[in-house]
Amino acid sequence: MPKSTTEQASTIVHLDEFQRWMVAVVSHFGTDEEAWNSEGATTELSHERALGNVLPSQTLTEYERIGIYRRMYFLRMRDALLIDVPSIRFALGQSLFEEVVEQYFTRYPSRSYTLNDSGLMFPTFVRESSLPNKEFLAELAELELAISRVIEAPETPPLTAEQIAAVPADAWENVCFVPIAALELHAFTYPVHDYFCAFEEKSSEDETLLAISGEPSYNYVCIHRSDYHTEHTALTEAEYELLTALTASVPLGIAFEAVQKHFGENPADAEKAQQHITSRFQEWMMSGLFAAIRT
Amino acid sequence: MLPNRWNLPDLGFGVGLRSVHYDYILENFPPVDWFEIISENYLSQGGYSFYALEKIRERYPIVTHGVSLSIGCTDPLNFTYLERLKRLADLMDTPWVSDHICWTGVNGRNTHDLLPILYSEETLKHVVERIRTIQDFLGRRVVLENVSTYVEFAASTMTEWEFIARMAEDADCGLLLDVNNVFVSAFNHGFDAKEFIDAIPADRICQYHLAGHTNKGTHIIDTHSDHVVEGVWELYRYAYSRSGGRATLLEWDEDIPPFEVVHAEALKAREYRDTIKNTTELLTEAPTGKTPQELLTKFAEEYA
């Protein structure tokens, strides 16, 4: 229905105030009425001026027409966050997850040109929130974001068997490694990797929630991509320390020396542990965690 | 075939590249004329997506189609984004760079939606300046698409089609005519879709888009989630008869079916094109002394 001349005259709006008003309304997660009357919206255009500017159609009111954009905004941001941190929904449940989506994007609206960055501030938001088990949830989100980063990291060719074989036997003590770009190591205070593995094992139809263990229990994780296939594997504390040192270009001999403290006093146990970690190191080399060796 | 004013190529009938189809395409290399990519999905140039794109690029023409240019936004242009876009466009050697006639947010906030423009002189001046700057920066023709809209504003002082025609002329940019979007907006706002198409300068159209939508009864949402409806095909035929050969692309973004289904839908466009009299014949038969625009107008009248 056309507006009257009086209504139109009162609704001459400028581009910048119109845009700020529309973003304020579209990104407000309350009812239509709350959105139009929100402080962000009315700072730009009074309810009356805004109502004068938005035209109804034959079938929809002004509120319903703007409401289409509002609903799509919520669904889009919810789905984007779900892609970034899928297991969080199983920790919170659908209803609480959707509440969290609204609170998160109100506190940290997207400022990126890509939806792929939607979850970047989520761990920070969770730590600032009053959610139960918030430290656990923040670390879980960090793990999921780390996996996404590794998936998108640049491809670097890994060491070849020939390059490894070319290192003289007496040089190994002093060699340093350059890691591939698609590699991240993480030490978590809570068992979030165990949780994430359980989440991945669920069938896509299984909507049951996964219980959170609120007790701290360190999880060490290596996330890497090889031939465009991303893996996340659990590490022992010794393995984590060794791999962290190697990716920081600490010479191999010094890095091995530093992790001896984990092998215990008993010589037989220590030898067994030494053999185990040596074998793990060889697996890492062969599975493409390193891009170059510096002798 | 009537050329567009820059002789940009008619790439034939293409499909929007989506990640669910990477493996099928790389295993089968189906006979698709070309692919369009969502630029923002590849700006980081990493991961399997970019690897798949590079492999596909070896065999098919690629056109970059963005969703974050935000040409109507009052914030300053984002040159970090534009730098990445330029790098991608150069790598893909895209014949043009396309995006939408819309804005996506303001004050640094991005709603990731294609928000509707106020069709005013103020907006027109602003948009034209930005297009010119971007074309200079990218060193490529910018081609802009009409979007589906769900609301109109009293502060608009011209129709969408008047705005688009003036914008294209003043900024000297190309147009991507999304026929489905014309259909959707015509339904939502109650205007004549053919009046819209008639007002668009045909020699500036570089590409067509086709897609499915969801009719909610009171309004239509541009969901790209289904087959193209008959009314949109008829509009496509009508528009194509005005412009002649232009690259045509099918988009499918929700409930995406197997690649063969999407490709078959795209190829329906060829059938519709074949029902149109060959435009070259019209040019050959046409009396001399007429401008291309006059010939186009005559052609449109003949096949209306």
Image (cartoon, grey):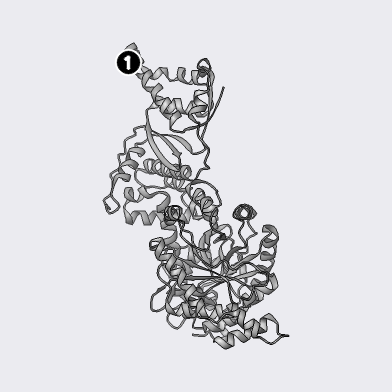
Which residue is painted at 63% across and 76% down in the image?
B2
Residue B227 in picture, x, y percent from top left: 41, 71
- Give the farthest residue toward the right: B289
- Give the farthest residue toward the top: A267
- Left or right position of B165 against B115: right
Foreground: A159 or B114?
A159
Residue A79 in picture, x, y percent from top left: 41, 57
- What residue is shown with label 1? A269
Residue A167 in picture, x, y percent from top left: 52, 21
Which residue is painted at 55% across and 53% down in the image?
B58
User: What's the amino acid at mark 1?
Assistant: Asp
Q: In this view, does B132 lie above or below B196?
A: above
Q: Please tell me how many numbered marks the rendered image carries.
A: 1
Foreground: A46 or A15?
A15
Q: Is residue B210 visible?
A: yes
Tell me the quarter of the image containing the C terminus of chain B: bottom right
Which residue is painted at 44% across and 60% down in the image?
A76
Residue A91 in picture, x, y percent from top left: 32, 47
Callout 1 secondary element: helix
Mark 1 burial class by Cα count in 10 Å: few <14, some 14-19, many 20+ = few
Q: In this view, does B39 lie above or below B182?
A: above
Foreground: B2 or A30?
B2
Q: Is residue A11 visible?
A: no
Q: Is residue A249 above or below residue B117?
A: above
Tell me the quarter of the image containing the N terminus of chain B: bottom right
Q: Which quadrant of the view contains residue B117? A: bottom right
Label 1 resides on the chain identified as A
